[in-house]
């Protein structure tokens, strides 16, 4: 089975073709067109700018993913007509692209995310589904992140506790089965990635702040500054990160020069604090729900300290930890195709005449 995944929920335009054989995934192609350089100029994402970039890139990105999916496969010749080419000549209802013909299902992120970004991917996917007569799967972006671990190991031990930590979300889910999610807690204010991005910004670092803080943190002393751990001791599985960012702001304002002189230590202390809170609550949830494994996912899962801290605690408690490869932590269409596979097994297809992008789609 071959699935074409499409992802445009935030600031990456991405398309991938994933093949599934007996539950094992092979990535035939993946294309990610990042807008980071553009958004760096404004220190964050301007939604309309992001949407315009998606509009510009969506068909070339899909086209490239389809064409690259056949390279190196002996039974396939690279098609002379690319999808873009065939679309120009196409008549509705006729399949014209040989590569898209070979794809069995389409999958697209339908939410949550920026509405204007999501709409570009969703409408493109609906149009392709209509013209090429392929079933379409509407995928929740967070389910996509949680599915990315399946690329490395399709035998995740269940029940599992999934932690999604991204720029827009920080949430814990109980997964009794693959593809089923029970929300057990989440952030009450900023997402973990958002806290990284905002803290970095106030320290004068470029967007996105997560990787910047993590770079500086490697050279810093993580025990130099004690930072608050809001909600850590509350008897629930919720998080709060905005207080840590405000704490950094107040400390900075007391003596900006001195604080910036020690920016590596600030970065390391901040990173350690966030990693400890996330690890503490995730382990607490895993123990309470007798989880056999923990799945870490989302952009902040690329953070080395978080990966290590969670690994140590998971080992101590005899719980497996599943973490995706670095490139699958941040937004990509491969994870969307993988999550779609779980839905295809349940025949969970979208009605293309009803499907709408939903910026607040809760998992
Ligand atoms: O999942 P993602 O690509 O997009 C959303 O769905 O939000 O996550 C992006 C977030 C950003 O906030 C970025 O700063 C953060 O992930 N991030 C990191 C690292 N790499 C990306 N945060 C901490 N450490 C990193 N190495
Ligand atoms: Zn994401």
Image: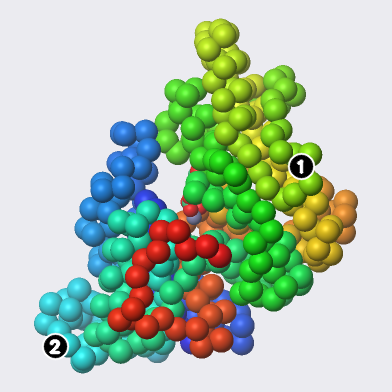
* Residue 74 coordinates in the image, percent (x, y): 41, 85
User: Considering only vertical position in the picture, is 28 above or below 76?
Assistant: above
Q: What element carries label 2?
A: loop
Residue 71 in view, yes or no: no
Mark 1, other Cα within 10 Å: few <14 / some 14–19 / many ≥20: few
Indicate if the residue with disc 1 has its beta carbon within 8 Å of ligand 1. Answer: no
Q: In which quarter of the image is residue 123?
A: bottom left
Judged from this view, the residue extending furthest toward the left is 89
Tell me which numbered mark, 1 or 2, is placed earlier along the sequence. Answer: 2
* Residue 326 coordinates in the image, percent (x, y): 57, 53
- Residue at image mark 2: 91
Residue 156 in view, yes or no: yes
Verify CB contact (< 8 Å) between mark 1 and mark 2: no
- Residue at image mark 1: 234
Residue found 54% across the figure and 72% down from its top: 339
* Residue 153 coordinates in the image, percent (x, y): 67, 70
Q: Is residue 361 left or right of residue 8?
A: right
């Amino acid at each position: 089975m071959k699935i074409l995944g499409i992802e445009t929920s935030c600031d990456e335009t991405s398309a991938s073709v994933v093949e599934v054989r007996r539950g094992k995934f092979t990535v035939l192609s993946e294309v990610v067109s990042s807008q980071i350089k553009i958004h760096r100029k404004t220190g964050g994402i301007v939604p309309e700018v992001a949407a315009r970039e998606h509009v510009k890139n969506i068909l070339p990105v899909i086209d490239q993913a389809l064409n690259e999916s056949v390279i190196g496969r002996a039974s396939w010749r690279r098609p002379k007509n690319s999808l873009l080419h065939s679309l120009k000549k196409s008549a509705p209802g006729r399949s014209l692209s040989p590569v898209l013909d070979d794809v069995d299902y389409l999958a697209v992120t339908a939410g949550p995310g920026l509405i204007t970004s999501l709409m570009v991917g969703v409408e493109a996917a609906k149009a392709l589904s209509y013209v090429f007569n392929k079933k379409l799967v509407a995928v929740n972006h967070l389910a996509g992140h949680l599915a990315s671990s399946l690329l490395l190991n399709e035998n995740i031990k269940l029940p599992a506790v999934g932690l999604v930590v991204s720029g827009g979300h920080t949430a814990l889910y109980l997964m009794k089965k693959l593809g089923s999610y029970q929300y057990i807690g989440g952030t009450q204010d900023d997402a973990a990635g958002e806290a990284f991005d905002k803290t970095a910004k106030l320290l004068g670092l470029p967007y996105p702040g997560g990787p910047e803080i993590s770079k500086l943190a490697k050279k810093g002393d993580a025990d130099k500054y004690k930072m608050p751990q809001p909600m850590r001791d509350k008897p629930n599985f919720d998080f709060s990160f905005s207080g840590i960012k405000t704490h950094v702001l107040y400390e900075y304002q007391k003596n900006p020069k001195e604080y910036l002189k020690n920016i590596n230590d600030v970065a390391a202390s901040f990173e350690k604090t966030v990693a400890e809170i996330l690890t503490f609550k995730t382990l607490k949830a895993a123990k309470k729900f007798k989880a056999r494994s923990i799945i870490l996912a989302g952009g902040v899962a690329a953070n080395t300290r978080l990966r290590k801290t969670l690994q140590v605690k998971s080992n101590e408690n005899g719980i497996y930890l599943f973490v995706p490869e670095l490139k699958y932590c941040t937004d990509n269409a491969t994870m969307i195709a993988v999550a779609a596979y779980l839905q295809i097994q349940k025949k969970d297809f979208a009605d293309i005449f009803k499907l709408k992008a939903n910026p607040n789609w809760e998992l």
